[in-house]
Amino acid sequence: MSDENLPGGTTTIEAPPIAARYFRVREATVELCRTLETEDLVIQSMPGTSPIKWHLAHTAWFFETFVLARASISRRPFHPLYGALFNSYYLQAGSQFPRAQRGLISRPTVDEVHRYREHVDQEVLALLRDGVSQELEALVELGVHHEEQHQELILTDLKHLFSLNPLCPVYRERRPEEDILPGPLFWVAFPGGIRSIGHSEGGFAFDNELPRHQAYLEPFEIASRPVSCGEYRAFLDDGGYHSGKLWLSDGWAEAQREGWEAPLYWKKEDGRWRIMTLTGMRDVNDREPLCHVSYYEAEAFARWAGARLPTEAEWEVAAAAADLEGNFLESGRFHPVPAASTVGVGQLFGDVWEWTSSAYLPYPGYQPPLGALGEYNGKFMCNQFVLRGGSCVTPRAHIRRTYRNFFYPRDRWQFSGIRLARKV
Ligand SMILES: [Fe+2]
């Protein structure tokens, strides 16, 4: 960060690249909240989401706990009780406030949380400026990726919160853009055989992307683009939500229990399908990629379409040569958009997370790290499914071809969509 002043300093200070990245990512989190009111920051809309204020504090807690406390064992915490308030799920890092009650934490105030963040920033940047061990630098890198995960969660949680408000609040104004007509969905064939899956040497990866290993694949075909809203609407119009024979038993039970009639955020008004977005309420655009469906809906749609969901290994093989560009958070769209037709498999990155048929399980030989950080990913490897590719609210620098996201099959508040696959 040779061309930037670090907070608290008055002169330009030479700092290592990790300091610049830390500073940019922390600033980006605050920027996401710039246009929000205090009232928007403190409400929890359901047990699975968190108030934005909590995300702001928890990401500071992560650096305080896993970087600052390790750098100096005699360091006193910023506040003796913040650890219990803002520890998410790390049993080995102390007690945790109940997740479903995070919306009840009216104190510390938003301003106090910002002061907490600033204090942690000053300490971390001072540490990085003075030079840190490789181990500590790796923990800062992990914290930066963790912060990016929470940037995405801030927007997904905010969207859910706003969707419950009859005023349909607008997060950011919609930017004008041409309505691209996507090409027809076509199939791209891949040969079978033994393929290497998982992260290889070099660059950051979460532990759940390791170790790289071999997987045997039958020949398969994968769709050239994600399923569009128009294609999904044909499923609705064909009674997809009223035909149990298309659904997994658990999925049908969930759909009945929750009264699902359409994807989350779709509402029928005066005979027209409308959709809640971060840029306001609008008509459903048949051309754009479908999102906010559960694994159960994705699976039922695929069956209705005479296809299936790809496995995560198939998805990764299809993505091996794909461009990592896409509609990510930085585009400022905050919503999936249609893409022009491609020669091969397109739109794998950005726009919508794509459900795979793969259970979220450890790769062969997986070993979680020792200590509390071993709880980051490994203990969730049960009853969830893998999603790939990132979404329109994922920071671009956060995604990789080997990135494994995971959610429960009933979850719909993420920007989760569908890509089809089939047997050759
Ligand atoms: Fe977290």
Image (cartoon, rainbow, N blue to C red):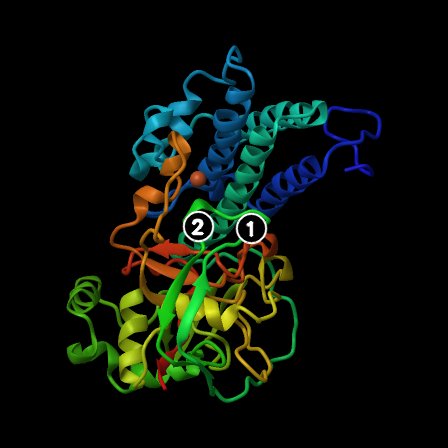
- Give the residue drawn at x 40%, y 66%: 313
413 relative to 185 in the view: left or right? left
Q: Identify the amino acid type marked 2.
A: Leu
Mark 1 sits on what residue?
201
x and y percentages locating residue 290 in the rendered image: 43, 73
Examine the image and state in which quarter residue 420 appears.
Answer: bottom left
Residue at 60% of width from left, 31% of height from top?
134
List x then y, in percent, for residue 69. Answer: 51, 20
The C terminus appears in which quarter of the rendering? bottom left
Is residue 291 in view?
no
Left or right, residue 377 beside residue 352: left
Mark 1 to mark 2 CA distance (whole Å): 10 Å
Q: Which residue is mark 2?
A: 210
Q: Is residue 145 left or right of residue 213?
A: right
| Quadrant that contains the N terminus | top right
Q: Residue furthest top?
A: 74
**Vertical order, 143 against 208 (above or below):** above
Among numbered discs 1 and 2, the one appearing first in the sequence: 1
Of the four image quadrants, the one with ligand 1 is top left
* Amino acid marked by disc 1: Glu
